[in-house]
Amino acid sequence: MDATDGSTETVGTIRTADRLPAEGVDADRMAGHWLLARLGKRILRPGGVELTAKLLAAVDIKRGDDVVELAPGLGATTQLILDRSPKSYRGVDRDPVAVERVAMLAAGPNRSVVQGTAADTGLDDESADVAFGEAYLTMQPTSQKERIVAELRRILRPGGRMAIHEVAFRSGVSNADRERVTEELRSAIKVHVSPLGEEEWKDLLSNNGFRVTAHETAPLHLLEPRRLIADEGMVGAAKFALRVLSDSEARSRVISMRRAMSGNDDVLEAVMISAERVA
């Protein structure tokens, strides 16, 4: 790869900074979050920037901390972490394009991004003070959720902080509604989405060696106009809307995703939960 300037590399004639995960996949088959990224949606979090800000406040990253981010994606949260100047940053993502993009963003001493899975990061035991992931566990089956949380416990030092930012079922939702909404989400997003209730998310952490320290919820308004503007800004939201309107195939997918989320606003919400590793 050849450097074109101090922050951008090229692969053939395509700049790394312009490449996106799942490149080459048709819009009707692409995972929903990467389709939104292709259309210009850079904040791909269930509770938007507001819930991400609460997550970062909960884990309270300090200059002496070693930080691990699972599935950083396009690096929107990565930049917020780097702004806090931790002792070290390590990102782990299974998509090679995401790894390249975030590695460029995080270039510098004691910063690295590796290709791997959240359940098998390849990182050393007790090598991190902070570890977290956003909008990742929701897309895993129950057994994989358990493995990922166990991996976070393994890489964290005793007393280390972790947090998750996921999709949750509201309290009191019937099993029938859970099954119906889960199938709608899977059909629209084309990912094996498996939300839990807020208490179930907390139990997942508590039953795997963590003590829950904070939790917050927010509406699941990922594709609502107000959330789009809050996350992307007026210009970014307008560009996203124009791209959606000009691409009929992508537009159909976006409408389907919006319907699956906003149409089930009484069933779904976003949740952030932080916890400490029990020694």
Image (spheres, rainbow, N blue to C red):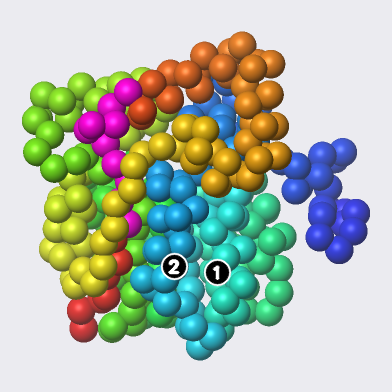
Dividing the picture into quadrants, the one containing residue 151 is bottom left
Left or right: residue 22 compared with residue 212: right
Q: Which mark is residue 21?
A: none
Amino acid found under the numbered disc labelled 1? Ile
Per the image, the residue denoted by label 1 is 81
Indicate the position of residue 196 as horizontal and vertical percent values: 21, 43
Looking at the image, residue 140 lies above or below residue 35 = below
Q: Say which residue appears at 60% left-offset and 55% top-offset.
A: 75
Whether label 2 touches label 1, CB < 8 Å: yes
Q: Say which residue appears at 82% left-offset and 39% top-offset.
A: 14
- The local secondary structure at tag 1 comes to helix
Per the image, the residue denoted by label 2 is 56
Amino acid found under the numbered disc labelled 2? Leu
Label 2 and label 1: CA atoms lie apart by: 8 Å
Indicate the position of residue 190 as horizontal and vertical percent values: 41, 26
Q: Say which residue appears at 60% left-offset and 49% top-offset.
A: 74
Q: Nearer the viewer, residue 19 or 78?
A: 78
Looking at the image, residue 198 lies above or below residue 240 = below
Segment tinted magenta in the rendering: 263-272
Looking at the image, residue 251 lies above or below residue 47 = above
Q: Nearer the viewer, residue 133 or 3?
A: 133
Indicate the position of residue 116 as horizontal and vertical percent values: 49, 55
Q: Say which residue appears at 62% left-offset and 72% top-offset.
A: 83
Is 265 included in the stretch rendered in magenta? yes
Tag 2: Cα neighbours inside 10 Å, few (<14), some, or many (≥20)?
some
The answer to whether any part of residue 121 appears in the image is no
Dividing the picture into quadrants, the one containing residue 112 is bottom right
Is 105 included in the stretch rendered in magenta? no
- The local secondary structure at tag 2 comes to helix
